[in-house]
């Protein structure tokens, strides 16, 4: 007669728990909202997106961890008023970074200049390969000059505009 040792029972439980965890993670990742949705406060379009987010949040609460450690909570961003500015005018801000800022809802100098510390951190964490450039290249300070139309002040601090 075959009998299983307590070690075999433990291994079976661990394998079963791992399978359940993989299934749950698969469901969660299928309906996961994008970082842009979290920053702009937009929700997914389908019921599955909402259900997956709810399951993800509930699991995080049960485990006592943040379900979205890599995604800051949504923050209110300054609304663009007027036509978009050419963000690539800022020193150190190229077309790809400008596109990323646009995806996050930043299209004008006055929006950049109006960001508070919390908003700056939320935007910076979503910049992908450009993370840290907001402060390093002083985009907020540059945008402040250009939002006010202070070309001379900008050029004194950052050099000639092209």
Image: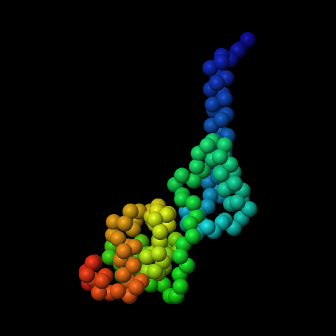
Q: Is residue 157 left or right of residue 1?
A: left
Report whether residue 162 is seen.
Answer: no
Residue closer to the observer: 145 or 161: 145
Q: Is residue 148 depicted above or below 35 in this figure?
A: below
Q: Position of residue 152 (x, y in %)?
A: 29, 87
Q: Is residue 131 depicted above or below 58 in this figure?
A: below
Q: Please identify the quadrant where the N terminus is shown.
A: top right
Q: Residue at x 44, y 84 (%)?
A: 85
Report whether residue 111 is seen.
Answer: yes
Residue closer to the observer: 117 or 57: 117
Q: Residue at x 68, y 49 (%)?
A: 58
Q: Is residue 112 left or right of residue 72?
A: left
Name the outermost residue toward the top: 1
Residue closer to the observer: 153 or 102: 153
Q: Residue at x 35, y 86 (%)?
A: 150
Q: Residue at x 70, y 60 (%)?
A: 50
Q: Is residue 101 left or right of residue 45?
A: left
User: How many numbered marks does the figure carry?
Assistant: 0
Q: Position of residue 138 (x, y in %)?
A: 35, 71
Q: How is the image coloured?
A: rainbow
Q: Please identify the quadrant where the C terminus is shown.
A: bottom left
Q: Position of residue 76 (x, y in %)?
A: 57, 70
Q: Is residue 59 depicted above or below 95 in this figure?
A: above
Q: Is residue 101 left or right of residue 34?
A: left
Q: Is residue 60 depicted above or below 106 in this figure?
A: above
Q: Position of residue 101 (x, y in %)?
A: 47, 73
């Amino acid at each position: 007669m075959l009998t299983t040792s307590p070690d075999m029972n433990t291994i079976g439980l661990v394998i079963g728990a791992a399978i359940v965890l993989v299934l749950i993670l698969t469901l969660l990742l299928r309906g996961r909202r994008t970082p842009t949705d979290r920053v702009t406060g937009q929700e997914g379009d389908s019921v599955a997106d909402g259900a997956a987010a709810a399951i993800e949040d509930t699991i995080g609460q049960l485990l006592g961890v943040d379900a979205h450690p890599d995604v800051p909570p949504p923050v209110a961003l300054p609304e663009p008023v007027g036509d978009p500015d050419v963000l690539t005018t800022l020193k150190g801000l190229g077309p790809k970074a400008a596109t990323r800022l646009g995806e996050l809802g930043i299209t004008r100098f006055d929006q950049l200049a109006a960001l508070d510390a919390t908003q700056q951190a939320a935007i910076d964490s979503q910049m992908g390969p450009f993370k840290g450039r907001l402060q390093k290249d002083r985009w907020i300070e540059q945008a402040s000059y250009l939002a006010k139309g202070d070309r001379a002040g900008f050029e004194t601090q950052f050099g000639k505009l092209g």
